Image (cartoon, coloured by chain):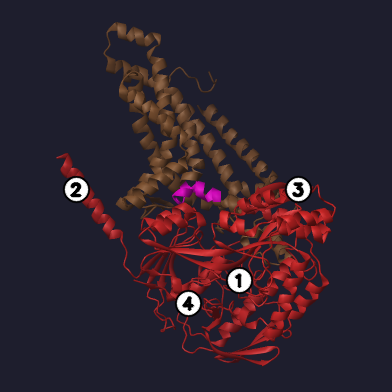
Chain colours: A brown, B red
Amino acid sequence: MAQFLLKRLLQVIVVMFVISAFCFGIQDSLGDPTRELAAMSMSDEERENLKDTLGLNDPLLVQYGRFVGRAVQGDLGTSYFFKEPALTVILKKLPATLELAFAASIIIITISIPLGVFCAIRPRHWFAKFTMAVSVIGISIPVFLTALALIFIFSITLGWMPSFGRGEIVEVWGYWSTNFASWDGILHIIMPAIALSSIMLPLFIRLVRAEMLEVLSSEYVKFARAKGMDSLTVYFKHALKNTMLPVITVGGVQIGIMVAYTILTESVFQWPGMGFMFLEAVNRSDIPLITAYIMFVGFLFVIVNTLVDLLYGLINPMVDLVSGK
Amino acid sequence: MKNRFLLTTCLVMASLLSFTTVNAKDLRLAYDADPVTLDIHEQLSGGMLQLSHMSFDPLIRWTKDLAFENRLATSYKRLNPTTVRFNLRKGVKFHSGNPMTAADFKWTFDRLKVSPDFKGIFANFTELNVIDDHTIDLVTSGPYPLVLHTSTYIFPMDSKFYTGTDANGNDKGAIVKNGASFASTNMSGTGPFKITSREQGVKIVFERFDGYWDKQSPGNVDRIVFTPIKDEQTRVAALLSGDVDFIAPVSPNDFGQIKAASNAELITLPGTRIITFQMNQKRKKELQDQRVRMAIVHAVNNDAIVKKIMKGFATTAGQMSPAGYLGYNPKLKPRYDLQLAKQLMKDAGYENGFSVTMMAPNNRYVNDDKIAQAVAAMLSKINIKVDLQTMPKAQYWPAFDDRAADIMMIGWHSDTEDSANFYEFLAMTPDQSTGMGVYNSGNYSSDYVDTTTLAANRETDSGKRAEMLQAIEAKIYQDAGFIPLHWQNLAWAARKGVDVDPIVNALNFPYLGDLVVQ
């Protein structure tokens, strides 16, 4: 186990190093931040002075060396627009995205597993066919369209839900303010969570159903039935566990993507999370923040994959993590 | 049992929603972005000037019909060709409680002269002299016609509040563009609203300053809750669903929705930002021929672009200066004549045309990429094959600096609300040492335009000055120095009961201090 974790730690460092080198390499195509920081009518001389202050006129290798030197001390640069360390900005926005991803995950898990199992157990039932049809529609409609439709129906026409923002959030600890401690906060998170889950829900329902169907036709399930085991035990004690293995693998990556790149949903709902922050950073050429964020995402994915592998090991005792069988 | 639960839930939700409806004297405001800083000298931009008008006051300000209105100045007169004396209003206080005196104006002026963004605007001003506590003299380096225009940028800051060192030992008055400073997070002005809480990118709360000097102001807004909403659809949805009271900007695509809504209204005004294309004479030798440029100008159908693409939300242009500016020449109408264009191309020897590259931004001006596509299609009618590339503004401006295409789009708004600014940046011969013609990607060059613009900047008689500026427009028009498209209009939307119409103006500085909310 220790060996496994150590390997993963090494992987994290390599991933972040490669990402940071890449970001510095493409820095020129990320645009000129002085255009957003200063007036159009600012003289060229002043603009060059500003670039000097920002260190943008130094050769790339010098800039990168400076960056690495600071990075090993935990300083990933200062955002041009938030005027705070990039890492602090990311950490401040992290709870908003995590809560949104969490709410969406709850919706996905509570809906997709029962529905997926039902569709596998009773494939010819009208409800199973109906669910499959609707899920195709769900995959086809882009998330921002779903989001706008939700806003139109529930905010404008019915006036039940607020149309943007996080609402009245309650401070919990440090940078973490939660939506779940107040009714207003919950009202604000419902629609974004539904919109976000609408992308993944069809995928997961179909995945659970497909895996379950395959498991149900396997030898040991037939054997269990032949042995006289009742259906419920067969389905939920034996079949489900095996179904969940690929679902967890896919699910882990998808949740990682949800946390890292929920850009569209956050933009439409003006949700002050990391995706929205990243979009604005790209539009404004806030290079330190862009670099810091992509590195953070690299870190996040290595963690998520590690957790998924550990979980996999827990569920399937035959898996040997270290030797990678 | 189930029905009762449902009913109770609905009642609880309804009552909670009613708690969220707001006191009528509150204004929930949503722009597309929030101010990046509280230091009004740190950045020259529309957003920062809007903030300046909310929390500070200028010496004088523009009215809706582009005249001047006294604010912190009670009167002014020109003493000699280089000096204008302003008498200052008495009894004005800053948010901190400090009284406003001439010393604050001197401090502010000195700071404007070192601010990287503002020093260009004040380049012709040499000093601000304090005559007594309520009198100041503005001195220019020579006769300068735009003293009043520039005075609209003098928003006195509380010099005592910004003097000294902060917790980190840095000067409180320092202007820091790329890092935090005292002034970027603390503010004390004379304006109607002071900031009581701020979370960057999320929300700012303004409360009315009860020591505000302007007792004549009809404004009755006590509190402004400002939330930036970047997505234009979401901003409109927020207004229509009643979550906010006043939004800006509004895209022409949303006009139909707002006009159809019963609880919101749309206000539009003609604007002063000109959208143009510039033809690069250095990159493409064909563009050096005046007949070719004339042909291109005549091939572009301004009316069609305004009608079909801008949905009527713009004013066609044949020149740079919009109506109301001294340089606006009523004889210079937009030109469209496809037959003449074809003839001119033939006369120049390019009947079979040639190919050009074109670049335009896709997220800077209203419908910028669609306009570029339309113009490219129009040019194909005179056999000019256009290879069009559009890109986000972050990538576009560096490309513009490099003059990376033969035809490039640029929009411009004059900081001084005066014609000469257009020519200084867009039509004068590019000169690194003087900084003129910085955005003249076409390299259009005319000695007449160069010398007359400089002369106009020394001419204080507005009649003579108007003649000079209009002559410059005529010369550029004759030379087909650039392709004028239109001036973008401005639009705001508010819920019924929020009387936005009297407080908006062509500069897009809504004077929220004077806003009346029913």
Q: What residue type is labelled 1?
A: Ala
Stretch in magenta: A266-279
* Chain containing the residue with disc 3: B
Work out whether residue A84 or residue B380 is closer to the camera in this orientation and state it. B380
Whether residue A271 appears in magenta in the rendering, the answer is yes
Q: Mark 1 points at which residue?
A: B174
Gap in Å between the C-alphas at discs 3 and 4? 57 Å
Few, some or many C-alpha atoms within 10 Å of disc 4 (few <14, some 14-19, many ≥20)?
many
Q: Do labels 3 and 1 share a chain?
A: yes
Q: Name the residue under label 4.
A: B191
Q: Going 63% across and 67% down the picture, which residue do you hit?
A: B413
Few, some or many C-alpha atoms within 10 Å of disc 1 (few <14, some 14-19, many ≥20)?
some
Q: Name the residue under label 2.
A: B8
Gap in Å between the C-alphas at discs 3 and 1? 56 Å
Point out the frontmost of discs 3 and 4. 3
Position above or below: A210 against A58: above
The numbered disc on residue B383 is 3
Pick whichever of labels 3 and 1 is earlier in the sequence.
1
* Magenta segment main secondary structure: helix
Work out whether residue A51 or residue B385 is closer to the camera in this orientation and state it. B385
Gap in Å between the C-alphas at discs 4 and 2? 47 Å
Gap in Å between the C-alphas at discs 1 and 2? 57 Å
Pick whichever of labels 4 and 2 is earlier in the sequence.
2
